[in-house]
Image (tube, rainbow, N blue to C red):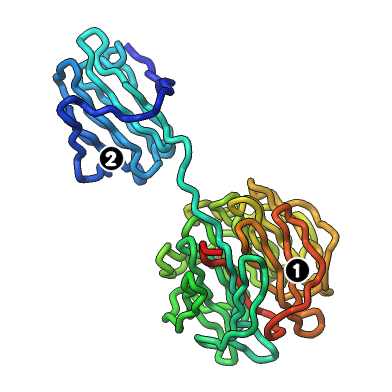
Amino acid sequence: MSGTVTNNTLRDSGGIAATAAGLNWVSTVVTGSTATVESGKGYWINTTSNTCTITLPSSAEKGDQIVFIDYARTWGTNKIIIDSNGLKYQGQADTYTVEYTTSGQSLNIVYSDATKGWIPLDDDATALEPVQPPSQKGIYAFGTTGSAVSVSNLVSSSGVIASDTTGVGTARLGLGASSFGGDKAIFAFGSNSGGQSNLSNLVSNGGVVATDTTGVGSAREGISAAFGGDRAIFAYGGGTQYWNVSNLVSNLGVVASDTTGVGTARNALAAACFGGDKAIFGYGTSAGGRQSMTNLVSNTGVVASDVSGVGTSRNGLAAAGFGSNRSSAIFGFGSTGSNTAVTNLVNSSGVVASDVSGVGTARNKLSGLNYGDDKAMFAYGNSGSYVNTKNLVNSSGVVAADVTGVGTARSHLAGAGYSFST
């Protein structure tokens, strides 16, 4: 006999009942491709790396119970397969295929009798995943005033930029910055009179910039960075050549070695989070000149191939995520050979919209960041001279007029969100 027993649709309280004698949870998380289980126990099944085939007991008594939990919410990617080991499952012989393929699911089965065998008491998926709070504050740091600097400026949850904080770390320009670990930030790469760098500086959730961390990855400038979930990614850049390599950053702020590049090698591009847990890199300069192409980044840090560009080709622009849970993003400003203030919105699927007429002082080599839960801003840059002007972006992606700047006027700096606290 053949066929598929599909997921049940029982939707009562969603609770997991215990056996009369109590359910014993196995302390070790199951990560293998196979597992043999026992009645009266609960199992955490982690299918992050592979599908798991679960063999049930070959004999059972009425009321025997087993519970399985999707430990890493990955059953939708790598399923579990139930082998009923000679006994029936929902009245069907064990020649039937029994699969569970919903992320976040729990499966609670009870043995009835020889006629119906194992029957799910419930097989609900947890309706909501925990959602990481968005960054509330921001920080701009480093850049050039004609020579590299290491000053920083904190941004409040209401978008107010504070005066300069004396710099920590090697002064440099053309670096990237991103949130990581949910409520912290990292600055990395860049250059100064000594050449290209791969140094990094962590920022605590209190906005304190740490001293230099020895670099990992190819030293380069004109790089950009973005985050997805609780990790970050630096990618592309230039200097001695155009680069398309990327470097992932763990949720502890550890920068990984180079990942082989995907997409057109270029520098002076921009990047932002979108869709809550993904990222997009866009625009920049390649060996072929200014570009408008983009590259999406999955929530596991995989950079996709080029997507045909939308909007004005330019370099030296900035980007930031905005909206509820950073569902959307915006690219703005930059140079086409002349400074511009046009912007391009990015929807929650990573689709870039056509140009929106610019608001604010046209400039390039500025930076963007997200702040205050669902808003963003562009600040600093070069309009023909160094400026510290800022433009706020509301939760709908509308760019506001110039606000008089605070802090050292400069360009080639970087910015990132940090802190869950308002």
Q: Determine whether the residue tagged by mark 1 lies in a helix, strand or loop.
A: strand
Position of residue 235 measured from the top left corner of the image (x, y, whole percent): 56, 66
Q: Is residue 182 left or right of residue 409?
A: left
Compared to residue 128, the image places residue 22 above or below, namely: above
Position of residue 171 measured from the top left corner of the image (x, y, whole percent): 56, 87
Badge 1 density bin: few <14, some 14–19, many ≥20, Cα 10 Å: many
Would you say residue 168 is visible in this rendering? yes
* Amino acid marked by disc 2: Trp
- Label 1: which residue? 391
Q: Quadrant of the C terminus?
A: bottom right
* Amino acid marked by disc 1: Asn
Q: Quadrant of residue 251?
A: bottom left
- Label 2: which residue? 44
Furthest-front residue in this view: 422
Q: Quadrant of residue 268?
A: bottom right
Q: Earlier in the sequence, mark 1 or mark 2?
A: 2
* Numbered circle sitting on residue 153: none
Q: Determine whether the residue tagged by mark 2 lies in a helix, strand or loop.
A: strand
Residue found at x 56% / y 61%: 135
Badge 2 density bin: few <14, some 14–19, many ≥20, Cα 10 Å: some
Mark 1 or 2: in front is: 1
Q: Nearer the viewer, residue 252 or 223?
A: 252
Residue found at x 55% / y 57%: 134
Residue found at x 41% / y 20%: 10
For the residues labelled 1 and 2, the Cα–Cα distance comes to 48 Å
Position of residue 48 measured from the top left corner of the image (x, y, whole percent): 36, 45
Residue found at x 32% / y 36%: 69
Q: Quadrant of residue 403?
A: bottom right
